[in-house]
Image (cartoon, grey):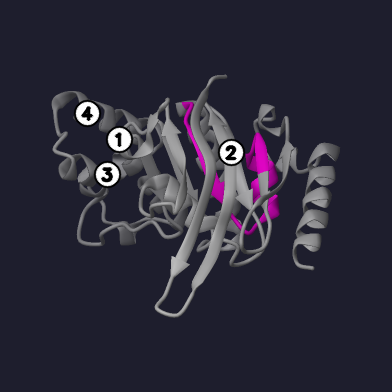
Amino acid sequence: MSQILKLQDISLNYHTLKDETKAIENISMHLDTKEFISIVGPSGCGKTTLLSIIAGILKPSTGTITLNGKPVHEAKNKIGYMFQRDQLFEWRTVLQNVKLGLEITHNKDPENQKYLEELLEKYGLYDFRNKYPHHLSGGMRQRVALIRTLVLRPEILLLDEPFGALDYQTRKTVIQDVSSIITREEKASILVTHDLSEAVSLSDRIIVLSKRPSVVKAEFKTNLRKIPLIEDRKRTDEYKEIVDKIWKELGTSEK
């Protein structure tokens, strides 16, 4: 796999009239093509802040971010962002919601329209295209949100706790759905989560951040994505060993 995203010495300081607060300090990391990584760390350590910097929502105080060797701010529409809640508009149908990104970017050409319909068909939503979000289950809503992001053909997906608002049973199903779709579409992805089970079972690598100001404290690689079903991944010794190691790292971060 080749490197698609690179962060070099990223720091972020928050300024007020009285003082300066360091949120992130000298973070360096990378993401390879087709790779799925998760970022975990103590509450308030800046995980979502880091995701916002990668997305270009926040500008780092120092450091550089490149996508395919170019400054990330030049990567228009190359980064897709999926939030904790699906952010669907209740007054728009499934089809209209999925088209939203294409409308905003003025890309409603026949090729993209065809691709949109192919995604809806491939992931079981075509028959619901004229339904409104309140007719859908929580899992189906998240699928719509993901397809809305994928239709823009991003090179990287950023996932900011996209399963956090779901109940336990729905969450299990949606995690498997999202994982399968991302693998099938061969998208490089970064997940921010508080849930170690999600992080380990979904990822090729897990990056552990320290408490604020955040630095990369540890990194763990897994081979679990070779196993198709997430519940089967959780039954392996490798899964249990990595979860235990991350818990220990997070425990020392709190001290």
Label 2 – label 4 distance at C-alpha: 33 Å
- Rounded to the nearest angstrom, the CA distance separating label 4 from label 3 is 11 Å
Residue depicted at x 20% and y 47%:
96
* Mark 4 crowd level (few <14, some 14–19, many ≥20, 10 Å Cα): some
How far apart are the alpha carbons under marks 4 and 1? 22 Å
Note whether residue 134 is visible.
yes
42 lies above or below 179: below
Reading the chain from its start, which is encountered first: label 2 or label 3?
2
In the rendered image, residue 204 lying in the magenta stretch gets the answer: yes
Residue 222 place in picture, x, y as percent: 73, 34
Among the two numbered marks 2 and 4 on one chain, the one whose residue lies closer to the N terminus: 2
Left or right: 180 as drawn, with respect to 245: left
* Residue at the disc numbered 1: 74
Is label 2 or label 4 in front?
A: 2
Q: Can residue 162 be seen in this view?
A: no
Residue at the disc numbered 4: 112
Image coords of residue 114 (percent x, y)? 22, 26
- For disc 2, the marked residue is 29
What type is the residue that disc 1 sits on?
A: Glu
Tell me the number on the disc at residue 36. Answer: none
Q: Closer to the camera, 226 or 253? A: 253
At x 56% / y 63%, what residue is drawn?
A: 167
* Magenta stretch encompasses residue 245: no
Q: How crowded is mark 1: few (under 14 residues within 10 Å), some or many (20 or more)?
A: few
x and y percentages locating residue 185 in the rendered image: 45, 28
Q: Mark 3 points at which residue?
A: 98
